[in-house]
Every structure is written in structure tokens, then in C-alpha cells.
Amino acid sequence: MTVRVGVIGAGWIGKEHIRRLTDTITGARVTAVTDIDAARAAEAAPVGARVLPDGASVVAADDVDAVLVTSWGPTHAEHVLNAIAAGKPVFCEKPLATTAEDCLKIIEAEQAHGRRLVQVGFMRRYDAGYRQMKQVIESGRIGEPLIVHCAHRNPTVPESYTSAMAALDTAVHEVDVLRWLLDDEIVSTQVVTPRATGKRFEHLRDPQIMLFETAKGVRIDLEVFVNCQYGYDIQCEAVGEEGLVRLPDPAAVGVRSAGQHSTEVLTDWVGRFADAFDTEFREWIAAVDAGNEPTGPSAWDGYAATVITSATVEALESGRVIATDLKPRPTFYGGIA
Ligand code: NAD
Ligand code: ISE
């Protein structure tokens, strides 16, 4: 069967995912697209797809089996709740919702429905390097993890990017992937700010060093540096009792030329995680097609990420260590991973 997908939000990543569902993944077809900018929706809609006036009409459409939400974060909760009410599987780009209250409404609605319908777009869980790291940690080869060192660097960000977005928009990926990698929960968060780079818009705190503590006592340091200039660079190294495991850099040829040996550094997340996005959608479409619950990041993971990143913003603004204060995890959502 072909899964017929309706897309809400035809901006940067909406277009990327429409292209992916149309040209890369088998078993899916985009049948409806909407955007508050109708011209953008028309431009992004593949041949044969209808342009609909709003998210509610996409969710309700008879030729839409599953919904993809790629609109702005503050609009996600409304679309996800509509999809749950219609009993349709919904893939929501991160964040699930911008407030803990809205995430909890989604969690309640999904539990009332009785089975999982929601998957959140934390694609790093589908990256081959992170998956290998998880296998090594679970095999026990490095012993119990004790410390994780991470860096999340973007070359530049636009003037609209705020200091809070370092946690809410950027570090949110590490928050999710580390909870999954360690099978552990983040219980406190703190931010320290080194000397600010001169290559930033004046209002922005950049770089930031985030310090997380997990329930098992693992300490995580994460450098978020969104004006690093040189490229898009994701680093992660877990140190255990008997060894360490490090995220591989993307494969790149070594070039020897003009007296130098060099390898390329990628410049954006689109290229760095292209394979992860493909795998993420392949697995999601396969689950929808088989009538199974999604196996990827759940509404609970989306809730946890929103609570932890919001606490990190509070930590930045107050200079204090902030407890993350998550609600007890419902059995409906199983274990951390
Ligand atoms: P964007 O601004 O390029 O696109 C968003 C689009 O949504 C715009 O075209 C806007 O007109 C439309 N829109 C907004 N509200 C709408 C609504 N209620 N109904 C229909 N359309 C609506 O933004 P983007 O970079 O594509 O980001 C979109 C989402 O994807 C964000 O939540 C962002 O955090 C997430 N994102 C995830 C990743 C990742 O690595 N997984 C990367 C980039 C963006
Ligand atoms: C963006 O929204 C993403 O999700 C990217 O993966 C991240 O690297 C970037 O910092 C965010 O702004």
C-alpha cells in the first residue's frame, strides 16, 4: 500500500521532507500540502498533490492517511491534537510543542486514544554513528558511562535567533539523543557562558556551555556555538569506566594539495543528517503502512525535551542550577529509550 501523507508547513524542512517522501522513500506519496503562505504551499506541492487552505483541512482530508507537521513550533500542538482526534498517525518536527502544558495535553489525548499515534522528529536516533555508539554502550564494552562531552556548532545564525534558542532549537537534539543513548533521564541543567564571540549579533549569548546531570549521576557538558564560522560540526564522546566511544565524523575524502592535507567539514544540518532523515522516514512510513505504532521518539520524549530545554533557558537567565522536574512517566510510554 502507499501511505498518503498530508503536509502542514512548506518552509525549509517541509520542502526537504516533501522531496524525501516523493523522490527518496518508497511507499509514500504526498497528497495534500498547506502553508499559511499559499504560494509557498503551491510551489512545494508535488505533481498530483492538492493545496488545502489550512492544517485542519489537511488532517480531515479523505486522501490523507498520515500527517506531517513542519510548521513553526508554536503551531505544532494544535495540528498534532487535531490528528489524534482524527485517529491519524502524525509525525511532528521538533519541538512537539513549545510549552510543557501543551505537550501534556497531547500525551493525555494520545493515551485516551489508546495507542501511540505521535512521533517527534528527533532524527539523530537514526544516524548510523549514534546507533553504533548506542550498541557499544549497551554491550558494556566501555563499562558504565560516567561523562559525556558534546559540541553542537553551526557556522552562523540569523539575527532572529535568540539566546534561548540555543537550548530550545539547537541543544534540544542533544537532550533527546543523550536520554536515548544513555537510557537515562536528565535531572538538572546549568549554563555557563564563556567570553562571547565577536562574530555574533549583539543580543546573543554565544557560545554557551550547558551542563546536564542524569538520574544515574552521569555528567554531560555540551558546547553550543552557533557562530563558529568554520562549518556544521557535531561532536559526542562518552567516557565510561573501562573505555570511551566517540561519534564518527561524516565520511570525507582526504585531499593532499598545495602542500596541505585536508578533509571537508560540512556546512549545514541538511547534509550532515541526510541519511538519518531518510532512515527516520523510511521507518516511520513502514510502521504506518503496517498499521503499527511508531517506534521512534514519542510524545513523552517530546514532553521531556521541552521541559529540559525550558529549564535550560531558566538556568541561562538565572545563573542557577535548575531541576528539570518531569512528571512521572506513564507506563503507556515504556522505558526511556
Ligand atoms: P520555516 O520558517 O522555513 O518554515 C515553516 C513554514 O511553516 C513556513 O512556510 C510558514 O509559513 C509555515 N507555517 C507556520 N505556521 C503554519 C500553520 N499554522 N499552518 C501552515 N503553515 C504554517 O521553518 P523550518 O526551518 O522549516 O522549521 C519548521 C520546523 O521544523 C520547526 O519546528 C523547526 O524547529 C523544525 N526543524 C527541525 C530540524 C531538524 O534538524 N530536525 C531542522 C530545521 C527545522
Ligand atoms: C535547527 O532548527 C536544527 O534543528 C538543526 O539541526 C540545528 O543544528 C540548528 O542549530 C537548529 O537551529
Image (cartoon, rainbow, N blue to C red):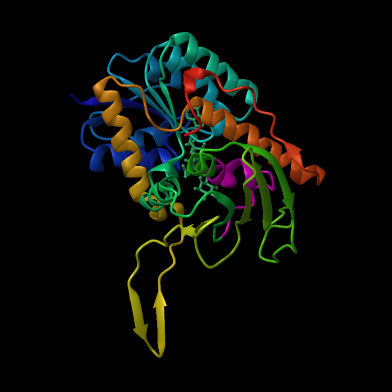
Q: Look at the image and tell me whether residue 54 can be seen.
A: no
- Residue 32: percent from the left, percent from the top? 32, 25
- Residue 221: percent from the left, percent from the top? 64, 53
Q: Which residues are magenta?
A: 156-175
- Residue 322: percent from the left, percent from the top? 75, 38
Image-based side of 319 in relation to 312, left or right = right
Residue at x 39%, y 89% (from the top left corner): 258
Q: Which of the 4 quarters of the picture holds residue 214?
A: top right
Q: Which of the 4 quarters of the picture holds residue 58?
A: top left
Is residue 15 placed above or below 266 in the rendered structure? Answer: above
- Residue 313: percent from the left, percent from the top? 71, 41
Residue at x 24%, y 23% (from the top left corner): 290
User: What is the tally of numbered marks visible in this picture?
Assistant: 0
Q: Look at the image and tell me whether residue 303 can be seen.
A: yes
Residue at x 38%, y 51% (from the top left corner): 132
Q: Which of the 4 quarters of the picture holds residue 126?
A: top left
- Quadrant for the N terminus, please: top left
Does residue 169 belong to the magenta stretch?
yes
Is residue 311 placed above or below 193 in the rendered structure? Answer: above
User: Which of 207/116 is in front?
Assistant: 116
Does residue 24 belong to the magenta stretch?
no
Is residue 90 placed above or below 274 in the rendered structure? Answer: above
Is residue 22 placed above or below 112 in the rendered structure? Answer: below
Residue furthest out toward the bottom: 259
User: Which of 83/32 is in front?
Assistant: 83
Image-based side of 182 in relation to 249, left or right = right
